[in-house]
Amino acid sequence: MDKALETMINNMPEKTGKSLDEWIKILDKKSFAKHSEAVKFLKTEHHITHGFANTIVTLSKQKDTPEEDLVAGQYKGKENLIPIYEDLLAYVNTLGDDVTITPKKGSVSIIRKRQFILIKPATKTRIDLGFKFKDKPTTDRLENSGPFGTMCSHRVQLTSSEQVDDELKSWIKEAYDQSI
């Protein structure tokens, strides 16, 4: 398990009044059609911050699927992209202990108070790295969000570890700084 996520789960009882297992039991008694409905329920009915609510809902859906399996499933047949993914995570883990890494079936959300980047193996040869920026112009490399739609404002297409360079890291840091 990612260290930031493990810390968040360990801090959950103190910060929210209940353990992850207790929150999952509460959600299991409800039936929400959408992820956002469950997050809203936790925020409004239980006064949990968005970061904890989102993490609880995400993990409640994944309780039978270990995170490693989710990531492994994303990269099945795309193993050549794993070094890029690992380089991105290595940098993300240097940003601060308030970062949560949340694997999903098709992507990995990187969250501070809100998602600031999204890592998605788009094809067998490319990872799309989605960013959430406020008022940032596009460039040849920092494109519009493309297939991410409103989930992200921008994206960078990565085909090799060499592309996880200082410029890309500066954009990741900028997105992290804006996600407070």
Image: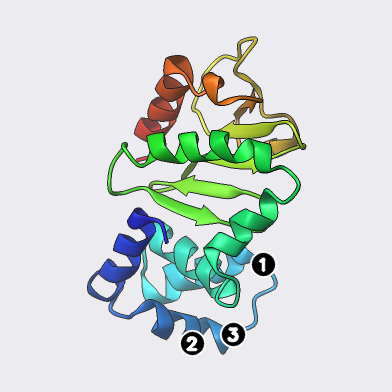
Which picture quadrant has residue 169? top left
Disc 2/disc 1 C-alpha distance (Å): 17 Å
- Report the amino acid beneath label 2: Lys
In the displayed structure image, the side of residue 1 where residue 37 appears, left or right? right
> Can residue 151 be seen in this snapshot?
no
For disc 3, the neighbor class at 10 Å (few under 14, some 14 to 19, many from 20) is: few
Q: Secondary structure at mark 2?
A: helix
For disc 1, the neighbor class at 10 Å (few under 14, some 14 to 19, many from 20) is: few
Which residue appears at 34% of the width and 79% of the height?
Answer: 19
Badge nearest the viewer, 2 or 1: 2
Position of the C terminus, as image quadrant, is top left
Which residue appears at 35% of the width and 42% of the height?
Answer: 93
Q: Secondary structure at mark 1?
A: loop
Per the image, the residue denoted by label 1 is: 34
Query: Mark 2 or mark 3: which comes first in sequence?
Result: 2
Per the image, the residue denoted by label 2 is: 25
Q: Position of residue 156 (x, y in %)?
A: 62, 24
* Front position in the image: 157 or 30: 157
Q: Position of residue 110 (x, y in %)?
A: 48, 45
Q: Position of residue 173 (x, y in %)?
A: 38, 28
* Front position in the image: 14 or 135: 14
User: Can you name the residue that lies furthest to the top here?
Assistant: 140
Q: Secondary structure at mark 3?
A: loop
Which residue appears at 77% of the width and 37% of the height?
Answer: 123
Per the image, the residue denoted by label 3 is: 30
Position of the N terminus, as image quadrant, is bottom left
Q: Position of residue 41 (x, y in %)?
A: 51, 72
150 in relation to 97, above or below = above
Which residue appears at 55% of the width and 20% of the height?
Answer: 163
- Report the amino acid beneath label 3: Lys
User: Can you name the residue that lies furthest to the left here?
Assistant: 14
